[in-house]
Amino acid sequence: SVIIPAYNESKRIVNTLNDIDAYLKKQTYSYEILVVSDGSTDNTAEVVNSLVPKISGLKLIDNHDNRGKGGVVKQGMLEATGDVRLFMDADNSTKIYEIEKFLPYFEQGFDIVIGSRRISGSKIAVPQPFIRDLLGGIFRLIVHTIVPLHVTDSQCGFKAFSSKASEAIFPKQTITRWAFDVEILALARKMKFKIQEAPIHWQNDEASNVKLSGMIRMLFEVMQVRLNLIFGAYK
């Protein structure tokens, strides 16, 4: 299952879905593609619906209210039916074919495989602006201090989970905005799931919706995850 959270993505979603379709229809396994619209105010839903007859396995979940990226990722991961469930960004910053690096790890017994832009073998074709990269480094340092995850890149939007891990972790997820990645990885560690990082090719999209204000909110959400762990909120 491929889950794509989408908020006002009518201008980018077509190319992304066509790219995913071109790759998946060549594979031997069955698949589905779930686009979860997060209360989009543009015509994202109409654009996706127009592609349903043309793209095999494509489904739309159209939310009228905005739930946050974490909220719709949770929704998509729990409505998906695949043995392996991948969520990826609508901007196609990481191409679907990177999943080829992930699948062997599931065969080896790993429960979760996450893309990393910061380990050997990764490639950043178009880097982020300096200030955003700097803020990202500060955020990673804070995360490692407050909620040690033992991964190099918690925020990459290309992560795959087994169905078992998905159905155990996502019902307990409480963070619905940008720091949800930290929470689901913290939950995975707490539940003793096996996590593997894999290098990916990634390029920054200048139209990204992540803003400075969002990064500030992320810090408060990371603190909330820490408090949840301390006070046993995830039992």
Image (spheres, grey):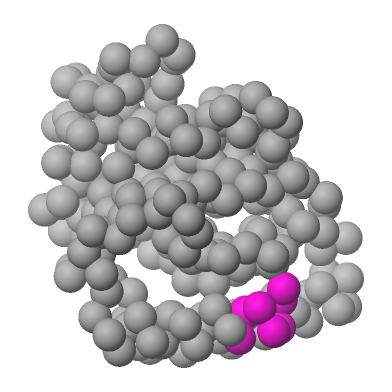
183 sits left or right of 55 in the view: right
Q: In which quarter of the image is the C terminus?
A: bottom right
Image point (23%, 58%), residue name: 125
Q: Residue at x 33, y 56 (%)?
A: 123
Q: Residue at x 81, y 63 (%)?
A: 234
Q: Where is residue 205 in the image (x, y as percent from the top left)?
A: 21, 64
Left or right, 69 with reference to 80:
left
Looking at the image, residue 99 lies above or below residue 62: above
- Prevailing secondary structure of the magenta residues: helix
Determine the residue located farthest toward the top in the rendered image.
28
| Image coords of residue 180 (percent x, y) | 56, 65
Depth order, front residue of 121/62: 121
Residue 77 can be seen, yes or no: no
Left or right of 178 on screen, residue 171:
right
* Residue lying at the far left of the rendered structure: 11
Q: Position of residue 67 (x, y in %)?
A: 45, 63
In this rendering, does residue 20 appear at all? yes
Residue at image position (33%, 75%) is 210
Identify the magenta region.
Answer: 142-148
Front position in the image: 45 or 211: 211
**Image location of residue 114, percent across then percent down:** 54, 50
Magenta stretch contains residue 16: no
Count the marks. Answer: 0
Q: In which quarter of the image is residue 190?
A: bottom right
